[in-house]
Amino acid sequence: MVWIHTLTDQEASADPAALRALDGARSPDGRVAEALRAQALAPAALAAHFEFYKTIMFGRSPLSRRLREMIALTVATATNCGHLKQLHAKALRQVKTPAGVVEALLVDFRDAAIFERERALLAYAHRVATRPDDVREEEVQALRRHGYDDRAILDAATLAAYFSFLARFVLSLGVAAEEAASPAPPSPPPPSPSTGSGTASGPGLPPGPAR
């Protein structure tokens, strides 16, 4: 359910720009997430939005895909956005994140069994999502002490701000959680260094709670 009219594929076929934008945002099973379909009334905005999303989630970054998804889910939980919580919990499970970690992030990132350096980055993202006026330079300096370089901090700030925007966009239009569909991932980028989080079989998965 969305509170504004969303274009069907048949309606979009009369507008080549809208159809191209929708086709570019399809999941592997051919669906388009309602949060994205709602933007098809403004196809240029939808196309630009989805390209930005693909860049920050799948492009080169010091942050691993798993850590990027953890930021997304932390922000979704902080903003109580059911659509994004469903979407990014599913994405984290797909990259073989332990079920307990996913369930904790759906409630409170501070209780998740993750490394302290990951928790520090999620705390920063949570602050950006909930009290951006309270973010202080000392928090950025603390992230550096945890080993994050300035590019990693930039990417974390971008992700937290983007998903804060997206949560507000979704909630303001009434996009329901049960209508969530995974956006289509682009072709995998070349491997990039990971700051604080590896693949599901790598060193990014701690064996138990990090307190």
Image (cartoon, rainbow, N blue to C red):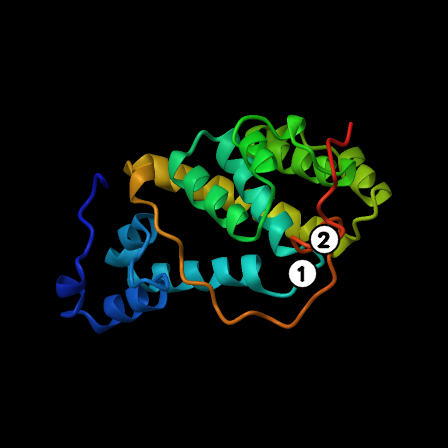
Disc 1 marks which amino acid? Ser
Q: Is residue 122 left or right of residue 182?
A: right
Query: Residue 57 versus residue 91: which sits nearer the camera?
Result: 91
Per the image, label 1 sits on a secondary structure element best described as loop
Q: CA distance from mark 1 to mark 2?
A: 7 Å
Q: Are marks 1 and 2 in contact (CB under 8 Å)?
A: yes
Name the quadrant containing residue 178: top left
Disc 2 marks which amino acid? Ala
Note whether 21 is above or below 97 in the view shown.
Answer: below
How many numbered circles are shown?
2
- The residue carrying mark 2 is 152
The residue most toward the right is: 145
The circle on residue 131 is none
Residue at image location 18% in from the left, 69% down from the top: 15
Q: Quadrant of the N terminus?
A: top left
Query: Residue 185 versus residue 130: which sits nearer the camera?
Result: 185
Labels 1 and 2: the sequence-earlier one: 1
Q: Position of residue 134 (x, y in %)?
A: 66, 28
Q: Quadrant of the C terminus?
A: top right
Q: Is residue 101 left or right of residue 174?
A: right
Q: Is residue 73 left or right of residue 194?
A: left
Residue at image location 43% in from the left, 45% down from the top: 87
Note whether 58 is above or below 150 in the view shown.
Answer: below
- Local crowd at mark 1 within 10 Å, few (<14), some, or many (≥20)? many
Per the image, label 2 sits on a secondary structure element best described as helix
Residue at image location 27% in from the left, 58% down from the top: 40
Q: Is residue 43 left or right of residue 97?
A: left
Q: Position of residue 52 (x, y in %)?
A: 49, 60
- Local crowd at mark 2 within 10 Å, few (<14), some, or many (≥20)? many
- The residue carrying mark 1 is 61
Q: Position of residue 189 (x, y in %)?
A: 59, 70
